[in-house]
Amino acid sequence: MANQLLEVKNIDVWYGDVQVLREVSLQVEEGTIVALVGANGAGKTTLLKTISGLLQPRKGEILFTGKPLHNLKPQDIVDRGIIHVPEGRRLFASLTVLENLKLGAYIKRARTNFDQSLKRAYDLFPVLEERKNQKAGTLSGGEQQMLAIGRAIMAQPKLIMLDEPSLGLSPILVKTIFEFIRTLNEQKATILLIEQNINQTLKIAHQAFVLKIGKIVMSGRGDELLANEEIRKAYIGERVRKQ
Amino acid sequence: MKDKIDTYLKKDKRNISIIIIALVIIVFGALPFYSDVDSFFAYYLFLCLLYIILAQGWNLVAGYTGQISLGTHAFFALGAYTTAIIWLNDVTKTWYYFDPLVMIISGFVPAIFAILIGIPLLSRLRGDYFSFGTLAAAEVLRILILRGGTFTQGAMGLRLPAEGFTGMGIYYWTALLLAILATAAVYFITRSRIGLALRALSEDETSAASHGVHILRYKVLAFAIGSFFMGICGSLFAYYLFIVSPPAVMNLNWMFLPILICVLGGNGTIFGPIIGAFVVGALFSYGDVFVGQVHPMLSGILIILVMKFMPTGIMGLKDRIFARR
């Protein structure tokens, strides 16, 4: 088997008395795009929050480059090379675009290569350079998403986790964002992606996991799942033609 | 080409600001030579400068870091008591009256106190709870001082030897110097990496943490630096009053006025606390003279009006006027 960057092994996660994830296991291979799909409330965001250290699993373990991760604090996990772009982007609205990017490179490891990362972010999203002194809150939705991804790149992560990057964007922008994700991946970034837009997501994903009420119910190559009748019926809402 | 012109203009603008700031400092520094230092006006200016020091300390914690502390009077009092206790017990064997060493120690003691209460308060409590926690810590300190026996002289307070007093000049200049230092400290901190982290965490703690900002460390750091200035300010006030007692230095006004000053002037801005201090100082000093005991009521009404119509303070008005054009 190829090089596993991230391995989630049988984790249980609870919010107080409510169990959200049940024995969830998932693997992310280095250099791939892995999609995590499923309906609202399936536990997708919870899983990302657990990986990035905002929540602790009650059971199971998470390995990153073969070393355990689940006992570390969020800032140490960033330091190890995982960056989480949360749902709704969570930009610092009153800070400028450049200041947001600087925060992306806050950890020591990223700071040393700041200029190089900044150039990379600007090359990927030229609009960010044009608006570097503008406050992040004044950007359009699409630009904010670009800034959120740009800010993630600044940390020089080994793994980027994107939570619903297409949320609230117009269809054209959604397409653009997916293209950016693919470009990012071609530049050797490993990506773990949560999306509602299952059709587009499975097209670019190398590997996908389907989460249903806290459990992984299916996994496989993106195109395999895309061809799967059950998936098409349940999540894409397409009527399956009788043959 | 346009970029070049822009940089020139920017440089010019910066030079002009530096010249204006230098002129203002010179005018303020020279004021005692032209006006009677022992006049009421000079007292008013001295008080405003004290307010600036306190308000900048609060501004760093609340305006830039988003933590509303209600313990300013405790740090102020701790600074004053540190000065008095060192002096009366002959601890440092220096000259005590306006002794830089004693003043600096009087800043460090509240800073250490801030770290000690800041670590539990800022790691567990958020928002309102942090405010109540600081207020409670201040009340605990008040009781400790009242029950301090011969060490603090309880409600009587500590009396300092006043033989060294020569006039208001040195008070005014020291206050001016400290106000400049406090403002400069806030300015440079907020423009540094630390300031970036502070402003980020004040906006979204979770997001800041997930970018590797050590939330607790920075919050405590800002709290300690703010308390350091509050303590030095208390030390200066001890030299001024020659009596350090709970009613004098633990007066709730020392907590309440800096907040009003920051909110009125513009919280989270460099010049807001300065403008606010002169406005609030004028309202309270002259309110006392002209409308006597009614002025706390008028001030209360003023606060409500400011909150309602100018939530961003006087500095915010500038943006609003320019935005309308």
Image (cartoon, grey):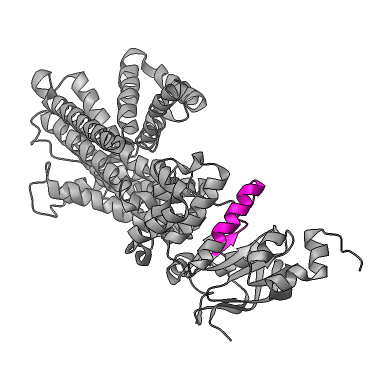
Q: Is residue A164 above or below residue B19?
A: below
Pick out the residue farthest to the top.
B290
**The one of B306 and A66 positioned closer to us in this rendering:** A66
Magenta-span inclusion, residue A157: no
Query: Could you say which quadrant of the image residue A14 lies in?
Result: bottom right
User: Which residue is at a point 47% across and 47% down the rendered structure image?
Assistant: A92
Q: Is residue B60 visible?
A: yes
Q: Is residue B210 above or below residue B101?
A: below
User: Which residue is at a point 36% across and 67% down the rendered structure image?
Assistant: A109
Q: Quadrant of the N terminus of chain B?
A: top left
Across and down, in percent, residue B85 comes to 21, 49
Q: Is residue A16 visible?
A: no
Task: Answer left or right for A189 relative to B20.
Answer: right
Across and down, in percent, residue B9 comes to 25, 32
Magenta-span inclusion, residue A179: yes
**The one of A182 and A218 positioned closer to us in this rendering:** A182
User: Which residue is at a point 67% across and 65% down the rendered structure image?
Assistant: A203
Query: Could you say which quadrant of the image residue B295 lies in?
Result: top left
Give the number of callouts: 0
Q: Is residue A101 above or below residue A182?
A: above
Pick out the residue farthest to the right.
A242
Task: Answer left or right for A73 relative to B38.
Answer: right
Q: Is residue A236 above or below residue A73?
A: above
Q: Quadrant of the C terminus of chain B?
A: top left
Magenta stretch: give its range.
A161-181
Across and down, in percent, residue B316 comes to 42, 28
Task: Answer left or right for B106 relative to B304.
Answer: left
Across and down, in percent, residue B179 comes to 23, 36
